[in-house]
Amino acid sequence: MNKFLATIALFFTFWGAQSQILDPVSWKTSVEKKSDTEFVLVFDAIIEPEWHMFSQFTPDGGSLPTVFQFKNAKGNYELVSKTKESPYKKVYSEVFEVDEYMFEKKAQFRQTIKVTNPKTNVAKVYVEYQVCKEACIQQDKTFEIKLPVTTTTKVEEATTAETNSDTVTTADNTTDSVSSIVENSPEKVPAKEISKKPEQKKGLFTIFFIAFFSGFAALLTPCVFPMIPMTVSFFTKQSKNKAKGVRNAIFYGISIILIYVILGTLVTAIFGADALNALSTNVWFNIIFFLLLVFFAASFLGAFEIMLPNSWANKVDRQADRGGMIGILFMALALAIVSFSCTGPIVGTLLVEAASKGGIAPIVGMLGFSLALALPFMLFAMFPGWLHSLPKSGGWLNTVKVVLGFLELALAFKFLSNADLVLQAHLLEREVFLAIWIAIFGALALYLFGKITLPHDSPIPSISVGRLLLGLLVLSFTVYLIPGLWGAPLKLVSGFPPPLTYSETPNGIGSTNVSATGILPDGAKSGPHGIIAFTDYDKGMAYAKAQNKPILLDFTGFACVNCRKMEDYVWSKPEILSLIKGDLVLISLYVDDKKELPAHEQYVSKETGKEIRTIGNKWSDFQITHYKANAQPYYIILDTKENRLTEPVGYTPDSEEYKNWLLSGIKKFK
C-alpha cells in the first residue's frame, strides 16, 4: 500500500513538473492541390485564450516574428511568392516603443510551392515563433508534409490510388480530402468574415489623412500655388458659360486624382501588396529609403531641383492644346510633370511611408494626396471670387518648401535607425539619433527666426507673426528633446527614436556602469540598472562559489516584453535592486539568442528531440531539461551546489511579493 501511495505521489510530482512545459499553440497542416505540380501548404495555428503570437512582418526592435524555413526546397520545389498570412492585430508596445503585429485565437499561413523534382513527395518545413501572455515562449516546430504528387506511370497510379490520390496529410497524422479542405478554406468564407480588422482600417485612415495634409502642403509650394489662379482663369475664360467652366474644372480635378491613384496602383502592382510590408523591415531597403529621403530633402533645401525631362512637358502641353476632355486630362498630366520638383519629394516620401504599411496603403495615400491637391482647383473654379482672397505669391512659398525639407531630413533618420536596429550595429543609438534631431530642428528654428538663409530665399527685413509663432513651436520641441540625451522617455515622439534600451546609457546618465570601472568579472556584462550579469552559466556559478553567494538564475529573452517589465518596474525598486546587487549573483540566460553554436557544440536534445543549433536553443533546452519549464521570465534561486532554495517564479509584477521571494531564498542560503 505504501509503495502504491509513493508511486501515486511520484506520478503527481512528475506531472506537476511537466505541466510547466507550456505549448499554447497547436498546429495543423494541410495541402491544397492546384495542379499536378503546384500545391498550397496551409499551416493553421490554434492559439490558447489570452495568448498571442506574432506576424512574420512585425517590425524589428520588438517581439520575435514567426519565421518559416523550407528545408528541402532547393532542387525539389520552388516557392511561389512569399508566405501569406491571415489578418493580424496591430498593437503598440510601450516597452519596445514599436507597433507589434500579432494573432489571437488563430492564425493561418499559406505557401504555394511548385514541385520541380517529380520524385518529391514530402515538404519539410521548420517554423520558429514566439508566443506571449504573462510569460513569453520561444518555440520551433518541424513539419514533414506529404504532397499528393501524381505519379507518372499507370501501374504506380493503380497501386497508390487509395493512399496518395488527392489526399491531405496533417501534422497530427490525420487525412482529409482536398475537396473538403478547399470548401472550408478561408478563401471560401464570405468577404465580410475575413475583412481587415479595425486596427488595419485605422492604419489606412491614418495614411489617408497624413497624405491629405501632405497634399495641402504641396499646394503651398512655389511650383503649385501660382498655378491655381492661372488654371482657374483659363477655365472661366475659355468656357462659353459658367456651368461649362465648372464642369471642366471638376473634370480637371478628377484627372489629377486619377493620375496619382494610378501611380499608387502601379507601385502596389509592381512590388505586390504583401511584399511591400516585408521590404519595410529589410535592412537594405531601409538604407535606400534613407538615402532617397536625404536626396529629396536636399532638393527642398535648395541644393538642386528634381526635374522631369522638358521634352515630356512639351509633348503633354501640345496634347493639352487639343481641347475637350482629352485636352483637360493632358493639362492635369502637365501640372503633375511641371510641379514635380516640388511634389516629387512629397509623393516619394508618402509612397515610402505607405509601403511600410503594406497592402493597398500606397493607393490610399495617393488618393488622399491628390484629393487635397485637386480640391482647390475645383472650388476656385466654382467660386472665382475667392481668388481675390488668396495671398500673393512670394518668398513665403519657398519658406514652406524649406520647412518640408527639414521635416524630410528628420524622417530620413528613422529609416536609417530601422536598419541599425535590425543589424544591432549600435551606430545610431538613442543619444546619437536625438542629437541629430536636436540639430535638425534647432537649425529649422534658427531658419524660421531669420538667422539662417538658404539659396532661394528672398531678403526679409522682418519676419511675420505666423513665422515667429511657428519658430517658437519648433524651438520648444527642440528643447523638449534635449532631456532625452539623459534618459528622459520623450513620450511625445515615442516610436521614432530607438528604444531606451538601445543607447549608450540604457539606465540613464548617473546610473552605475560597472563596465566603465573595469571591475566586470570574466563572462559578465553590465546588466539592467548596472547589475553585474553573467551570460555564461559555468562562469557565473564559479563566481558565485568564489563569492559564496546564492545565484539568481534568470531565463529571459531579448524580445520578451514581460522580462523587460520586470527589469524596468520591479528590479528598479531600491530595496530589490540592493538585494540583487549585494546578496545575489545574477545569471541571465537568453533563450532567443540567435548566435550559432560552434559545429562541435551543436547536438540533438534528448528531452525534446530538437536540433540545438544556437545559443538560445542551448539555454532553452537547459531550462526544459533541468527545470521542466519553457516560459520566460523564469526565476530560480540556487545555492553554490546548484540546489534550488525556493520554488521558481515567473512574471511577478507585485514588487513586494518578489522582494519576499528573494529574501526567502537568501535567508535559506545563509
Image (spheres, rainbow, N blue to C red):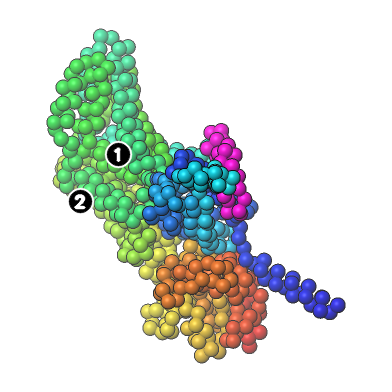
Seen in the picture, residue 459 relative to 237 is either above or below; the reply is below
The residue tagged 1 is 347
User: Which percent across, then down, holds residue 311?
Assistant: 13, 31
Q: Can residue 383 be seen in this view?
A: no
The one nearer the camera, 376 or 464, is 376
User: Which percent across, then down, holds residue 603?
Assistant: 48, 73
The one nearer the camera, 614 or 564, is 614
The residue tagged 2 is 452
Q: Residue at x 15, y 35 (%)?
A: 309
The one nearer the camera, 617 or 1, is 1
User: Which percent across, then down, holds residue 487?
Assistant: 41, 65
Q: Residues within 10 Å of mark 2 (few under 14, many from 20)?
A: few
Q: Residue at x 22, y 14 (%)?
A: 238
User: Which percent across, then down, holds residue 116?
Assistant: 39, 48
Which amino acid lies under the numbered mark 1 shown in the image of this protein? Val
In the picture, measured across the screen, residue 80 lies left or right of residue 161, that is left
First to last magenta residue range: 169-193
- C-alpha span from label 1 to label 2: 27 Å
Which amino acid lies under the numbered mark 2 shown in the image of this protein? Ile
Seen in the picture, residue 396 relative to 453 is either above or below; the reply is above
Quadrant that contains the C terminus: bottom right
Q: Residue at x 20, y 32 (%)?
A: 338
Q: Earlier in the sequence, mark 1 or mark 2?
A: 1
Seen in the picture, residue 349 relative to 591 is either above or below; the reply is above
Q: Does the magenta stretch include residue 180?
A: yes
In the picture, residue 505 is in which quadrant? Answer: bottom left
